[in-house]
Amino acid sequence: MIVPMMHVDLVCVAADKRATLAALRDLGAVQLDLSSAAGPAVDEARRDAEDAAKAVRLVRKAREGAPEAKGADLRPAGVGDVLAFAADRERLVEESSRLSSEIRRYSAYGDFDPALAKNLLDSVEGLRDYVPLPEALPEMRLSKMHEKLARVENRIRIVDAKLAIVDDAAILAQYPALADRIAFESACDVMAQAGELSYVSGWVPAPKADALRAAAGENGWGLLLREPAAEETPPTLVEPPRLFRPMKVLFDGLGIAPAYTEADVSVPFMCYFSLFFAMLVGDGAYGAIFLAVTLAMRRKLSKSWFRLLAVFSLATIGWGVLSNTWFGAGLPWCADWPTVKWLGDVTYKNIMLVCFTIGASHLMLARVWNGVCRLPDSTAVAEFGWAGILLFMYFVTNSLVGIFASVPKCMMWVFGVSLACVFLFSVKPKDLAKNGISLGMLPLNIMSSLGDIISYVRLFAVGLASVKVAENFNSMALGLLSGDKPLWFNAIMFVGTVLILVAGHALNLAMAALSVLVHAVRLNTLEFSNHKGVSWSGYGYRPFRTTNTKEQQ
């Protein structure tokens, strides 16, 4: 569900502003709009964070250029120390460049003494006409320039070595505190003042309103809580059922959130996304690799990400079992399984039927869900009518590609009744002047629904492409081992075979993961969401609290 929000207006004594914000941060329940913060303290905090990020980049760049530093004992150093090293290095590099330029300029004249040359030029009139000396004399002789350049370059290497052994992890550990400082100073900046009072507005989830009231009573704050006004846009806090809670991290990772007034689609999103993931990857062995990587990274992943990736991996393994697809090949002892034979139909009609069935069920679920939510309003009838139109289009789609011989006659009646329901109940009579144009768009919307169902064939097309790419890499690799060749030649070909198999399947695995991000996300956030009425125009609930106390998903 989408958790109800309450609008917060909080007032405190101006002298206690920072203490109030500290208590509010410890409570960790109120979301503040900090986007407009731009005071001097905020700028300083942001600069410190930028300096820390710059310090980490400098250390890592120095370490890349100093392979000998890998494995060395790292030493702690402050951000200021690293930036000082970098400034010193920049000065030395400029000096090195200047000396190199001077050496190139005067190397043609040899290693002469500039002081002696100056004395001679001053004492002997017209000497420059006979002796080829430069217009401007250098500060030192050429040999001294080379010596100084060597010292400067050695100092650069020393600075690089110092940077390379700095413990960048210790600097990274400061990031949460720096982010908290930016947030706190931003909150101080947006908290307005009127005379002896300071005030701020925000949002709090309704279940946490009592905790905020208790904190206001303890700290002597003035507090006003109210329902959101029609023109306001509260943040969206999605709270799916416990089994489907991992979807929150996927929404955060994709940077999407339903609008506050829309529905929480976490349950169907996770169910269908898992199925899409499995079909788009299309290979049980790839699913096993995903699962192995997920298990190996268990300690680095949050609980939600671990559970989500495990579900996706197991779904892919399950699809590999049903279709008998493992690294683009099939296991001989599974070839006669009923599911393998049925899905492996050479005409591809059965797998396309699966795709269209998934698409129709996905879209019809959205419409039926809308209808149930709108009951007893008359517009619910129109939503059920759309479900009937989608069912009719499902049969039309299958007949178009030759899966069904024709559309059953009974479906003509279903379409006629459904069309009447949509036309008569989509818009109430009192709203015809305002929304009547939507009835004129009905033919286009019906054709669009046909295209929506057809678009689910991408599950078959992309999954098949992944399998075919794997098969081609297998054929290419195994082709190197064919023929009666000398042992040394077969040994070389065996190495080549292994390299082709590893590189080919790694590339195919990466392409499969990319296809999931493109197609599985699209089918949920576009086709399904358009029918469900989810615009993903919301913004997530991000309470004002310290980073290190955030709930682990």
Image: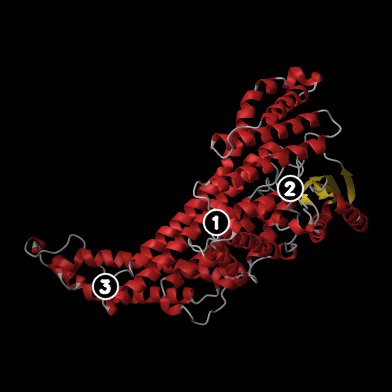
Label 3 element class: helix
The residue identified by callout 3 is 145
10 versus 379 height, above or below: below
In the rendered structure, which disc, 1 or 3, sits on the residue that comes first in sequence? 3
- Residue at which label 2 appears: 190
Crowd class of label 2 (few under 14; some 14 to 19; many from 20; radius 10 Å): some
Q: Position of residue 515 (x, y in %)?
A: 53, 51
Q: Is residue 388 visible?
A: yes
- The residue lying at 72 percent from left, 42 percent from top is 365
Amino acid type, residue under disc 3 in the picture: Met
Q: Nearer the viewer, mark 1 or mark 2?
A: 1
For label 2, the SS is: helix
- Dot 3 surroundings within 10 Å: few (below 14), some, or many (20 or more)? some
Instruction: Identify the residue shown where x is 43% and y is 73%.
Output: 160
Q: Amino acid at mark 2?
A: Val
Cα distance between the residues tagged 1 and 3: 63 Å
- Taking the image as shown, residue 301 lies to the left or right of residue 549, namely left
Mark 1 crowd level (few <14, some 14–19, many ≥20, 10 Å Cα): many
> Of the residues under marks 3 and 2, which one precedes in the sequence?
3
Quarter that holds the C terminus: bottom right
